[in-house]
Amino acid sequence: MQEDKLSDDIKNIVKKWEGKKGSLIMILHDVQNIYGYVPRETSLQLSKYMDVPLARIYEVITFYHFFKLVPPGKHLVQVCMGTACYLKGASELLHELRDILGVREGGTSKDGLFQLEVVRCLGCCGLAPVMKIDEKVYSKVGKDRVADIIAEYEEEQVAK
Amino acid sequence: MDKKIIYIKDTSFALDRTKDVHAILLNGLRDRGMQDSVQAVRVADIGAYNQGVVVKVLPDTTYYGVKDEDLGRILDAVKQGTVVKELAARKEPGQLRIVLRNCGVIDPESIEEYMANEGYQAIKKVLFGLKTQDNTIDEMKKSGLRGRGGAGYPTWMKWNFAKKMASDQKYVICNGDEGDPGAYMDRSVLEGDPHSVVEGMMIAGFSVGASVGYFYIRAEYPLAVERIQKAIDQCYANGLLGKNILGSDFNFDLEIRLGAGAFVCGEETALIASIEGKRGAPHPRPPYPSVKGLWDKPTVINNVETLANVAYIINRGGDAFAKVGTQTSKGTKVFALTGKVKNSGLVEVPMGTTIREIVFDIGGGVYKNKNIKAVQTGGPSGGVIPKDFLDTPVDYENLQKLGSIMGSGGMIVMDEDDCMVDIARFYQRFCFDESCGKCSPCRIGTAQMLGFLSKIAEGRGEIGDLDNLRRIAQSMQRAALCGLGQTAPNPVISTLRYYEDEYRVHILDKKCPSKKCRDLLSYKIIPEKCKKCGLCFMNCEAKAITGNKDDGYIIDMNKCVRCGRCFEVCKFKAVGKE
Amino acid sequence: MSKITKESLENIAKQPKKEENNWIKVGMSSCGIAAGADEVFKVLTEEVKKRNIPVAVKKCGCVGMCSVEPLVEVNVDGMPQVTYGRVNGEVAIQIIEEHIHNHRLVNDHIYDIQVKK
């Protein structure tokens, strides 16, 4: 990551929200949209440009589940743990993913390909149980389908 | 219509004979020479359940429980244009769409389509017909609309409090932080009819004297955010937002702020902190937001579904709206009907509809024809309603009496396989994860309760734990700072109230009657049924199954990790689980 | 587009509501898209264009029948208004060929039929 490039992006984001009250969370959303997480250097720079103590920025980042401090795996695997999904077998689904990927929730698989996360309700309760890989939602996923779905992404990686 | 249409579906739970009946109908049509003038079609859903074969003849004749031998008479009647009176049936139970009036009807990205469906007529009526804040609030008072986000506080009173405050700046906020895992009506409305929520915000803004409004929407709902932003942009481009709206002296601006994955931010003081860019920690009320809210200014916070009702009320009049519903709860409620129900989805019914009507007549009954055990409403702040109370008409007061709440409208159906200890533990884990940590009753209480529940579910429970759970629950209800903490014990309290027996079996017999709690299960091979095929042996990753094809197999429960694989793979049901 | 005024809103209100016919609507909320509505929308638009059928393919929000998404609603002259569920590319083509072209309803995918007044 180049220092100058980083600064430009940050400057643009800060400029976009200039003069608006209470914009820190929105700025962090914009940062995470670019990098996939909130790098420490960025927080330092934000602190400088916005004249906000670093501790204030970190207290917000660590409070909200959505913000990440470390780079996520290449593909984000999200298992919905809403009530509807839970009743229809989401925990079995999660167990299966843990076994296949060899990580627990919040972790990145050894090859750096997958990031396993548990989310609270993707709002597709009628299709439970639901998992999401990047932008694609897999509905009514039985645990027997998990291995095939993951394999698709692995093959795609090999093909590259 | 160029052709007459008959459509059929076998709605029996056990065996679906739709195709056979369809074939008989086709033959019957051919015999009568009607094959070209009438089309008989198999449908996937006919809006009735467990009624045997249902035959509908367009436009409006329905026959339930049709026997094969009746089909001929029905076709004869169709030919003559008459009805077989003794077979024709009552009207079906209906939904009533007020909140979802435009969802699935109009293109949510088109302001023109919204306007062609009464769109922005309500704000016009407010500005030029009702003219004053008081008249508008009065209309809301007549409607009897209560907040759809949880507590059910009358909307007009909220507005009136904020209106009465003297201040240079006031705000209105749309709470789109739908955090109840299992409810998604707000997402659906934001995605399917964004302009109606925008219009609701404008009317709320006018009524309280606010010139700025914020949408607070979960970051997990990107499409909702995109569609609301589009709606806002279209309004600005058309002069419906900004200065001097429609030539009046009403100015109003709208902006979106994103949540970042914190359940507590659905609580209004925490939500305000989050919009201010801070940690979403709640603060004690009073002062209420209508007195001192966003940036210490008077603020009204309404939920998405509440706001989606507003334009309808103004257009049709508060009195007309108040005709729908019960004595204390007016209008309709949208439920996200999910869990072990056949047709999961969104359902909008008049207040006062019974839970049984919602689950069985509209939802089609329980998934896989199992027996219903309970219905959960109100999410992590609500409780379970056992099957004995299915005939309760749904409104705010009735649900509260049963130890649950209306909440945002999740309605989760549970069947006999669902364990109440497990459910209580699921919700408690949720509340433990989501507790913001500011007050100790909630921070420590949720952790302690989760500990006791886990202990019970894992077979280490003691009978005294039940009293401990009750004591902690009571202290949390009394002492926690915000709504999340005060209501977090509800799932535990309500499962203990109705299903204490189930807790006792877990504790005393170390068994889970619903066979859900993994640690309490034991597997064994039933020799009479076992064909010694060895499939379980091959599939056991834990190497807990030993034996061979001659002597048969046994499971060593000391090695077993209770994955259930052997139970699933056995084709002869020779693996017993208890 | 010019600005909307009080008068233009009054005009809209005065006009009798036009009942448009000949459209196909695809439910395109998160749940619909998750179940594959994108693909269905694409197939329908392409086929309508390819066959030069005078039918508008539109997007709409969620009607609430989430367990049977993707949902497609069809309204053409001479036919009742029909909601098809669990639609995939194949069924989408059947809808075009059977329902729209031959005026015959497609079996096994209908979830709602509304009679036009």
Image (cartoon, coloured by chain):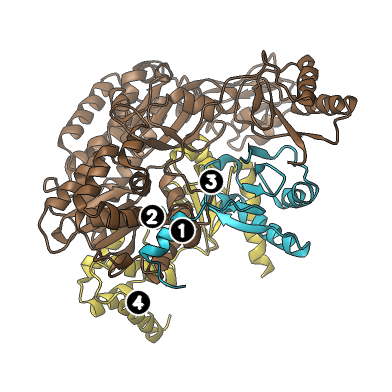
Determine the secondary structure under disc 4: helix
Mark 1 or mark 2, whichever is nearer to me: 1
* Chain coloured yellow here: A
- Is residue C92 found left or right of A54 in the rendered image? right
Q: Please tell me which residue is depicted at 61% across the width and 41% down the height of the picture.
A: C68
Q: Name the residue carrying label 4.
A: A13
Q: Please tell me which residue is depicted at 58% across the width and 36% down the height of the picture.
A: B542
Question: In 3D space, how far apart are the residues under numbered discs 2 and 4 (Cα atoms)?
Answer: 38 Å
Question: In 3D space, how far apart are the residues under numbered discs 3 and 1 (Cα atoms)?
Answer: 43 Å
User: Between residues B512 and C4, which one lies in front from this camera angle?
Assistant: C4
State yes or no: discs 1 and 2 in contact (Cβ < 8 Å).
yes
Residue B61 image position (x, y, % from top left): 66, 26
Picture quadrant of residue B512: top left
Mark 4 or mark 1, whichever is nearer to me: 1
Mark 4 or mark 3, whichever is nearer to me: 4
- Is residue C20 found left or right of B110 in the rendered image? right
Asked if residue B556 can be seen in this view, the reply is yes
Q: Name the residue carrying label 2.
A: B121
User: Between residues B539 and C46, which one lies in front from this camera angle?
Assistant: C46
Amino acid type, label 4:
Ile
Asked if residue B516 can be seen in this view, the reply is no
Q: Quadrant of the N terminus of chain B?
A: top right
Dot 2 and dot 3 within a common chain:
no
Callout count: 4
Q: Colour of chain B?
A: brown
Amino acid type, label 3:
Val
Amino acid type, label 2:
Gln
Q: Colour of chain C?
A: cyan
User: Residue C12 got which mark?
Assistant: 1
